[in-house]
Image: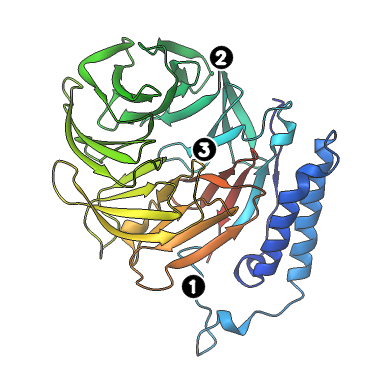
Amino acid sequence: MAGVDLYATFVPRALVEWPAVWQQVLAVDARYNAYRTPTFPQFRTQYIRRRSQLLRENAQDFEEDPRSQGPRGHRRSVSRGSYQLQAQMNRAVYDERPPGSLVPTSFANDDKHLLACCSLDGTLSIMTLSPPPASVKVVLRGHAGPVSDFAWSLSNDVIVSTSLDGTLRIWNTEDGRSIREVRDPEASELLCCTFQPMNNNMTVVGNSKHHLHVVNISTGKKAKGGSSKLTGRVLSLSFDAPGRILWAGDDRGSIFSFLFDMATGKLTKAKRLVVSEGSSICSISARSWISREARDPSLLVNACLNKLLLYRVVDNEGTLQLKRSFPIQHGSQHVHSIFCPLMSFRQGACVVTGSEDTCVYFFDVERNTKAIVNKLQGHGGPVLDVSFNCDESLLASADSTGMVIIWRREQK
């Protein structure tokens, strides 16, 4: 199926762990690659592939940096896992799609190789990354406007998506068929969506007229009592694991918590936190507990404050208390972050975020100093979204130029 160019560029351990300069070289190449032969995108793809190959060959000629070794010559862990560039999806082959055409990106639930991306041209692409080479499995077509968000159902047989055309669509992920279309009752742009984790028959959507709606995807109707109003455009949503508390963030700097009735879909507004007046809450991610050392329920927030914020959930109404923050470059774009899925079972706890400086950052939330434990370079624009597969063996990152990079975890 035409439309996506995926290619493998396997980078040796040395290229990731020691010579950060090679990552920087590749990042500069990626940043300026769009200016090379703008009418011949295949050349740009071939150029980056060849550049990666040359860097790989050159990296093997250098000895390891002594600074990366411990006092007895043992290698220090650079992060919870060093990630190597594995594959790249180039927006240039997407038939003249506008810049930023691929932004939200998400692996399927409990799946290692199924990845979906949505686009400003109104489509969603579901890709399989194994066996190599990676390929497009199906393209979901039907939205008349840019796709703003999407979510996988727990069983991965359904995807729900929202669009600026004012519609919510439910898709069959096997054949790409649109099962149902639900129009926003206010005819407003739909900006975000999420499934109720314990009842995937219900989904929550947020719109540009400050409203939340709970929708029954089987009937296409709003749940009775399942609507509420925020102070601004609803940009982000996240449930706690049991599905009893819903957090919603808006573009006025507020995070609201709601109690969710799983039997009826009714929303009861509980708490409001003003993170920063006028700052967009563009990403919320909830976690029941992060690690053996950090067992409190937590919320990870991106709020256009040049910081990544980690909150502690202190009660059953979703009240938030700031635990700590991490410096990133984030002033205006919709940057997302995630918890590492397996960190609960290891010592330490990591979170991963995009950044407007074109890098992907790993932070250890339990470190009091030098919290950055890894930094991935290779994008040519602000990194807006990141997504892990279920076992952390692959990390997908998407930037504002429409490029998605797949990073493979180093095998110890």
Closer mark to the observer between disc 1 and disc 2: 2
**Secondary element at image label 3:** strand
On screen, residue 107 above or below 16: above
1 and 2 marks in contact (CB < 8 Å): no
First in residue order: circle 3 vs circle 1: 1
Q: Give the percent coordinates (x, y) of residue 383.
A: 56, 47
- Calculate the distance from the C-alpha at mark 2 to the C-alpha at mark 3: 20 Å
Q: Quadrant of residue 41?
A: top right
Residue at 34% x, 66% y: name it.
348
The kind of residue tagged 1 is Ser
Residue pointed to by mark 2: 144
Which residue appears farthest toward the left when viewing the image?
Answer: 316
- Calculate the distance from the C-alpha at mark 1 to the C-alpha at mark 2: 47 Å
Q: Give the percent coordinates (x, y) of residue 211.
A: 31, 23
Residue at 41% x, 40% y: name it.
280
Residue at 71% x, 50% y: name it.
31
Closer mark to the observer between disc 2 and disc 3: 2
Residue pointed to by mark 3: 105
Residue at 36% x, 54% y: name it.
309
- Calculate the distance from the C-alpha at mark 3 to the C-alpha at mark 1: 28 Å
> Relative to residue 344, is residue 65 drawn left or right?
right
**Crowd tier of the residue under label 2, counting other residues whose Cα lies within 10 Å: few below 14, some 14–19, many 20 or above:** some
First in residue order: circle 1 vs circle 2: 1
Q: Foreground residue, 360 or 178?
A: 360
Residue 24 visible: yes
The kind of residue tagged 3 is Thr
Residue pointed to by mark 1: 77
2 and 3 marks in contact (CB < 8 Å): no
First in residue order: circle 2 vs circle 3: 3
